[in-house]
Each structure stands twice: as structure tokens, then as C-alpha cells.
Image (cartoon, grey):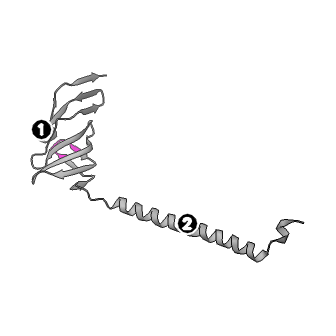
Amino acid sequence: MNYLLSLNKVYVLFVILLICSIFFIFLVFQIYFKNENDILKKIEISNVDITEPKFSINNNSKKIFVTAKEGNFLKNDKILLRKNVKFKSDNFSLLSDNVTFDRKKQTAFSDEKSLFKSKNTTISSEGFNIMEEGNKINFIGNSTIILK
């Protein structure tokens, strides 16, 4: 005799519904706790004053746009820019990780590895100093210049 035909159909249906219910409850809890953990990860307390700051250094002849991932106010006019700091104009771009920017004097200083790129020139240095509202850039420390 076939064993499956001897089973009570009501019991089989009950067991199938019970298994489906347990599976459904498991999925609901997984989705709920996953969303709750994602929300908690997003609510981290940050020690950054400015996230993704963007501004420009203006002088008579050109604009130099400045972007970074993070910024902290050091004093009223001084900002420490961190993580992927970029100075970009029509003629060049300058990349570094930590830069101190003076909003009042429109100057910037970094003593970390920096990379300057223009049309025919690449300069890598241990730091830089932007002076006179962006008209002058001094490279600090060991520098390598590549001319094309």
C-alpha cells in the first residue's frame, strides 16, 4: 500500500501551512532587524563640522574651486580640510589630504603629500603653500617635477 495515500490530508495541509508560517515570520524578522541595523549605522555621531565643503578662492584673473570630504573649523577664518582635498581651476588641479585654508586671506597650506597637475606639468611634493589669493603656489619639501 502507498504510504502517502494513507496520510490524513488535513494533517499534511496543517504541516505545510505551519512550515510556510514559520518561514514567513523568519523573513519578516530578517527584514525588520536588517533595516533597524542600517538605521543605527547611519546615525553615527560625527566629529566633522562640515561635510563635503565646496567654495572658491577668488582673485582678479581666475577662480580656484576647492572641494573636500570633510572640514573642521580651527578658528573663525581657518578651516582644516581633510580627505581628498582638491583645488581646481581652468589651468591646473592640486590634490592633497589635509589642508589648512584661511578664508580671510584666501590662502592654503599643507605639509602632506600633494600632487599638482596642469596641461604639460606634473609636480609631486611633500606639501604646498598657496599665497596671494591663489596667484602663487610654493611647493614644500622634496618635490618631483615632470615636464612633457
Vertical position of residue 125 compared to residue 40: above or below: above
Tell me the element at label 1.
strand
Q: Is residue 62 magenta?
A: yes
**Percent from the top left, x then y, of residue 6?**
84, 71
Q: Is residue 140 magenta?
A: no
Question: Which region of the structure is painted magenta?
Answer: 57-64
Vertical position of residue 97 compared to residue 26: above or below: above
At label 1, the amino acid type is: Met
Return the disc, 2 or 1, that comes first in the chain's sequence. 2
For label 1, the crowd category at 10 Å Cα-Cα, with few meaning under 14, some 14 to 19 and many 20 or more, is: some
According to the image, label 1 marks what residue? 131
**Which residue shows up at 28% across the image and 22% down it?**
147
Q: Which mark is residue 26?
A: 2
Q: Which mark is residue 41?
A: none
At label 2, the amino acid type is: Phe
**Which residue shows up at 16% across the image and 49% down it?**
79
